Image (spheres, grey):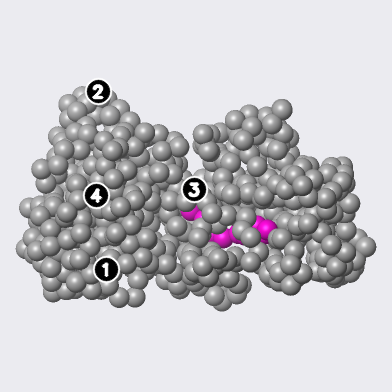
Amino acid sequence: MKYLQGKFPILKKQALARDVYRFWISCQEVAKIAQPGQFVHILPPGFGLRRPISIAGIDPEHGILQIVFVIKHEGTRILSELRQGDELDMIAPLGHGFTLLPEASHVVLVGGGIGVPPMLPLAAYYGEKATAVSGFRSFQQVILQEDLENYGASTICCTEDGSAGAIQGFVTTPLEQLLAEGVDAVFACGSQPMLKAVAELCIKNHTYCEISMEERMACGIGACLGCACKIKNPDTEEIQFLHVCKNGPVFKAEEVIW
Amino acid sequence: MADLSVNLCGIDFKNPIIPASGVFGYGREYEEFYDLSELGGIATKGTTAQKRTGNLSPRIAETPFGMLNSVGLQNPGVDHFIAKELPYLLTKNTVILANIAGSTQEECAEVAEKLDATQVHMIELNISCPNVKQGGAAFGTSCAMAEQVVSAVRKATSKPLIVKLSPNVTSITDIAKAVESAGADAVSLINTLLGMRIDVHTRRPVLRNNMGGLSGAAIFPVAVRMVWQTANAVKIPVIGMGGVTSGEDAIELMMAGASAVQVGMAVFTDPYAPVRIVREINQFLDAKQIPAVRDVIGTVQPW
């Protein structure tokens, strides 16, 4: 089994910041096989299309998945109104996740805003070998810094207005310094401008980098070809449209055409 | 258990439910959920002569009870389809409808000719794709052009030929009659309705292609109307589609005159939709003590 569809109960719900929620979901079968960087495809009650939401925690032992999402429009608002004990209609786990590098001694996890949650399973895997650089607009959006630290990662929090964290400005400022000091790999998720900046910095520094992309989706499993992303094969230079749901969401930085 | 089998153009279907072209790829992704042999048939992703990359993203937009798409016929080309996808599909014990499209009559005929040499069961010619610049819907919105392209494809294949019609026309019956006279063995309808949404905050269309095809439950009443009109206008069988989400929807399209039913967007909401609809059709027939699904075709009693 690669993925399945089912209805899974919400064990616990937590508001992390304004319009940002965390669910703990009981789904033994999915938690057993899910990988960092994969996503779940959730149907908000009453809607026709599912919402792809990245996995923010994998606990195979207890059969629990975590997701963190922000209210964007009506569908995610309806999801946010679900409560402990309600069931989520989910197809999961989906997509091609981050590469796990057992040999790496120092990796950087770059998350921007709602791109921070998928860094948690990576922080769980890399522990003290990870530095998590997180960027937010302002102190009101800051999430998950303690969770990252609880896994052993050191954290660098950046806010654009300087209202929280050690750095005023973008994630690229501390990232540049870390790259200069030398890191084995960078994993990133966030807005497209942030990902582009991170990818370009890593390519310039010859540092291995993987980024998690987002696109509007329908099927979520690679059948409908809705979520196209322009990708270059680094060996043949051939440009093709691959699909965020199946070929991604994680791609190598040098493959993505912006 | 009612008899769910139907026969179209001499081809036996174990039940009338067929995932529509474009939503189901070549079926592989849905095999994680169920056995493809549970389906009446599969309409494969539209195939052109050469590989096509499709349109830029975003290609998808949700709309009330529906969605817009502007995928733009992304596909690996007919040679790849015949070599890599079709042999596998033909082992699945279900009817395979190879959906084809092209920018020119010659391209459509070339694809049909290549498929004619395979074991594929039926060819579904798409003259109604709203998302490509040339061919596509242009073929499907003029009787003269529809007739020409169907004639060209008819000469290229002796396989049962279904022509998939566009709803973006003034008179669906005129187009249906034109393709019937040009040699179509069946028609399928409706393809998507041309639509558009704008993000009022950015003043940009939600789709990168500006416009796209509207599908889903929102278009179901249009499908029922057009299937009914068409079934009353032509002698060849009609395959109905457009916003079917339940067994009762499928029965409704069949009462309007459809001999089989394709399922599109519902597959995204519920990947099990096609097999659930088969089950629901059976439940409906059993509850009404109707022995065979064939018995409901065209049985609407209009006022």
**Which residue is identified by label 2?**
B1
Q: Which residues are magenta?
A: A210-218
Which of the labelled discs sits on residue B97, or is there none? 4
B92 inside magenta stretch? no
Q: Nearer the viewer, residue B85 or B55?
A: B85
Residue at 41% in and 38% down: B31
Q: Position of residue B263 (x, y in %)?
A: 33, 47
Q: CA distance from mark 4 to mark 3?
A: 22 Å
- The reply to whether the magenta stretch includes residue A211 is yes
The residue singled out by tag 3 in the image is: A221
Looking at the rendered structure, the kind of residue marked 2 is Met
| Residues at circles 4 and 3 in contact by the CB criterion of under 8 Å | no
- Cα–Cα span, label 2 and label 3: 33 Å
Disc on res. A38: none
The CA span between labels 3 and 1 is 26 Å
Secondary structure beneath dot 4 equals strand
Q: Which residue occupies 37% across, 61% down?
A: B75
Q: Is residue A113 visible?
A: no
Where residue B247 appears, x then y in whole percent?
A: 32, 37
Q: Earlier in the sequence, mark 2 or mark 1?
A: 2
Label 3's element? loop
The residue marked by circle 4 belongs to what chain?
Answer: B
* Circle 3: residue type: Ile
